[in-house]
Amino acid sequence: MRIAVDAMGGDYAPAEIVAGAVEAGTGLGDRLQSIILLGDETAIRRELDRCGKTPACITVRHASEVIGMDETPALAVRKKKDASISRAVDLVRNGEADVALSAGNTGAVVVAATLKLRLLEGIMRPAIATMMPTQDRPLLLIDAGATIDCTPEILRQFAIMGAVYSRHVMKQPNPVVGLMSIGSEETKGNEITKETFRLLQASGLNFRGNVEGHDLFRGETDVIVCDGFVGNIVLKTAESVAHAIGAWLKSALTKNMVNKMAALILRNDLRAMKTRMDPEMYGGAPLLGVNGVCIITHGASSRRAIFHAIRVSVDAVRNQVNQHIVDEIRKFNSKP
C-alpha cells in the first residue's frame, strides 16, 4: 500500500503530520509499501530527525507551495500547481500512490480530487463519509461537507455509497439507512428531503425513514444521509458537545475529595468512554465518489489522528470500495 501524505496541511503541520506518519510506518509497516510525505523538504526532514529513526517505508518529495485553510479552494488548486495537496492527488492519478491523505483545506482536497481523478462512473457528486460513535456501533454520516447543494438523486447516490462503505469496511451485512430531517414522519422536511424519502423508499436499500438529531447516537442506524451543509454542522456540533461533556466531567470529578475518589474507582470506565468519544480514533473520512482513494482528516489532527487515518486508508483500498460503488450504481441505474 502506497500512501501520499500532504505533510503541510493542518493546524499542526508539518510536525504532527510527520510524527503520525512515522508512527504508522512503524506500527503498520507490514501493511504498507510506502508513505510519501509531500511538502517543504527541509521542514519535513527536520521533523523526521526529531522523531528519531525514520521507517524505511517513508520517503520525501518536495512541493514548493501550500494551500492555506482560508483560501478559496477552486482558485487555489488552479493557481498553486505545486501545492502539497495537489501533488498528493497527482501521485494517485499517475499510479504512483494508492491513497492521497490530507488534513489541509477540505474544499481544496475535494476540488483537486474531482478535477484530477474525476468521478466514478455514474456518480454525480462526491461525498465525505465520516464515522461517529453511537451506543452500540459507529454510524456513517454522509455527506460531511463535500457537496453543499444536493438534488434528491444526488442524495440517493450518497445513500448507496454510504451503504457500500458500511457493508464492506465497517462490516455491517445489511446497513440501516436513515435520512436526516426535522421529523420522523414522511411528510416532514423540505421538498428535496421529501422527494429523497420517496426515492430511498423505492431504492431497495434497508431504509428506516427519516431520522432526527436526537436519533443520531442511539445506534439504530448505520448510515445517515444529508447534504454537506447540514452534515458539516452536525459533525462539528457533535464534536463540540463531546469536548464540552469532557470538560464538565473533569470539573465535576475534581471538585472535591469524594468526587476524586469516585473518579479513581471509575477511571477505567471513564477512559473507555473518552476513547469512544474521541474522533481521532476513527481516523480520516474517505471522499467517496472520486476515481481514486482520498482520505480527509480534521484540520486539528494530531499524530494519533494521522496514524488512524493511514489505517483507514489501507482498509479502504483493501476492501475495493470504489469498485463496489460502481457495481451498485450500475445495478440501480439498470433498474426499470
Image (tube, rainbow, N blue to C red):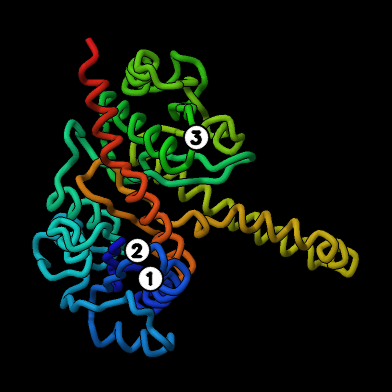
Q: Secondary structure at mark 3?
A: loop
Determine crowd level at label 3: few under 14, some 14-19, many 20+ residues with C-alpha closer than 10 A. Answer: some
Residue 268 vertical position relative to residue 318 in the rendered view, above or below: below
Q: Amino acid at mark 3?
A: Gln
Nearer-N-terminus badge (2/1): 1
Q: Whole-Å distance between the Cαs marked 3 and 2? A: 28 Å
Whole-percent x, y for residue 88 in the image: 21, 64
Q: Is residue 87 left or right of residue 36?
A: left
Label 1 packing within 10 angstroms: few (<14), some (14-19), many (20+): some
Using the image as rendered, state which of residue 243 and residue 307 is in the foreground: 307
The residue that appears at 43% across and 88% down in the rendered structure is 52
Mark 2 and mark 1: span between their CA atoms? Answer: 8 Å
User: What residue do we see at 17% from left, 74% from top?
Assistant: 65
**Residue 67, quarter of the rendered image:** bottom left
**Residue at disc 1, secondary structure:** loop
Task: Answer above or below: position of 232 versus 177.
Answer: below
Residue 257, image x and y in percent? 89, 69
Q: Quadrant of residue 106?
A: bottom left
Instruction: Tell me the number on the disc at residue 103.
Output: 2
**For the N terminus, which image quadrant?**
bottom left
Q: From the image, state whether disc 3 or disc 2 is nearer to you.
A: 3
Instruction: Return the mark for residue 172.
Output: 3
Quadrant in which residue 206 is drawn: top left
> Could you tell me the amino acid type at mark 1?
Asp
Q: What amino acid does circle 2 point to?
A: Ala
201 left or right, relative to 83? right
The residue at the point 61 percent across, 34 percent down is 218
Decide: marks 2, 1 in contact (CB < 8 A)? yes
For marks 3 and 1, give the one nearer the viewer: 3
For label 1, the residue is 11
